Amino acid sequence: MQQVWKNTLYLYVDQHNRQEVDDRHHAIKAPITDMDYNLRMSERSARLKDWYKQRGAMPAKSQTKAKLVRTYEGDGEVLVDMEFHIQRTMDQQGFLMLEERIEKERITLSKEGDSWVVARVEHKEPERAVRRDIKEEEQALIKSRSKPYLNPSLLGSARTARRVNYRRDKAVEYAEQWWNEPNPRFEIFELDCTNYVSQCLFAGGAPMDYTGRRESGWWYRGKVNGKESWSYSWSVANSLEHFLLSSKAGLRAELVDHPNELKLGDVIQYDWDGDGNYQHSTIVTAFDLYGMPLVNAHTTNSRHRYWDYQDSYAWNEATNYRFFHIADIF
């Protein structure tokens, strides 16, 4: 019986891959009875067609590697947690770009007569963090313990008279190396986007502003005497946004108006609801043919993703952005 529901799941995975490049679905379709899902995907397909035109790009090829994470089998129903590694090749006037992202879904399969259907599809939106008191949010971020990485400069003063160049190449190199896995030398977070961006900035030479107070500065010390020791700005998107807007020394940034003003190693932040609460952070790691940024991110692990995130399930018409150009010299 298991093989029967797995056959339906295989059809869904194949359809999932084809939707990335072609919504005409010439192959056999998966039996999906989730009408909300079908409506969402129809609207998304139409929106992405316009999005591709605006970008002057078209998806040329897509490869989706599906990983079955866990299953919950009941009487006539199976819940499946899936992880999709999507590799999409975009074509801009013959200029090919590979975009990658990891998405997670929960799929409910139900038995109808002798057949199985996809009864429900739930898209995970981990970039859309629930608003909490900042201390509660910080506690919710922590996933597990790891070996803390201590910045050697913290043995003395984090502030130094020596001027330091921001090595954008090193920031991007780090972002590329760790885009799809956590660096075990740092604490591992469930909501990891800002922790990852902070690590990239640090790898590029951005000096920590160690205050010893979690609500100020920009710093990381890992676990100290069994207690968390890093600033909110290191790991919480909204706190990093506040820090970059106000910092006058050490890590500094200029707020610019347009994404085409950014350089490699710069930062983009996302307010999905347009309410002034920034929930997601990314770092610029490449550019398309027209000079528009492509970004890397964690939480929904992404590599060379188009900057505006309109292919994200978290995106909507209310989404606002912050474009931060990181200082060249600290």
Image (cartoon, grey):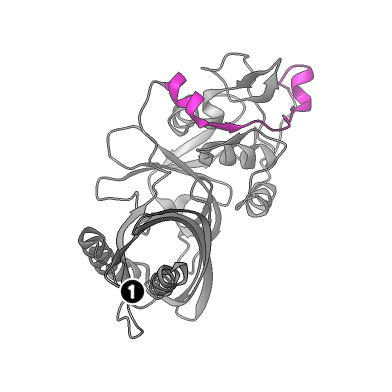
Secondary structure found at label 1: loop
Q: Is residue 236 visible?
A: yes
Please, what is the three-letter code of the amino acid marked with disc 1?
Answer: Ala
**How many tags in the picture?**
1
Magenta stretch contains residue 278: no
Using the image, determine if residue 37 lies above or below residue 93.
Answer: above
Which is more toward the observer, 191 or 259? Answer: 191
Q: Residues within 10 Å of mark 1 (few under 14, many from 20)?
A: some
Residue ID at (31%, 76%): 23
The stretch of residues the image draws in magenta is 134-161
The reply, left or right, for residue 157 in relation to residue 239 is right
The percent position of residue 217, horizontal first and vertical second, equals 57, 21
The reply, left or right, for residue 300 in relation to residue 174 is left
Residue ID at (57%, 52%): 264
Which is more toward the observer, 159 or 10? Answer: 10
Question: Which residue bears the numbered disc 1?
Answer: 30
Which is more toward the observer, 322 or 225? Answer: 225
- Quarter the C terminus occupies: top right
The percent position of residue 78, horizontal first and vertical second, equals 39, 57
Q: Is residue 247 visible?
A: no
The percent position of residue 48, horizontal first and vertical second, equals 31, 66
The reply, left or right, for residue 53 in relation to residue 86 is left
- Quarter the N terminus occupies: bottom left
Magenta stretch contains residue 148: yes
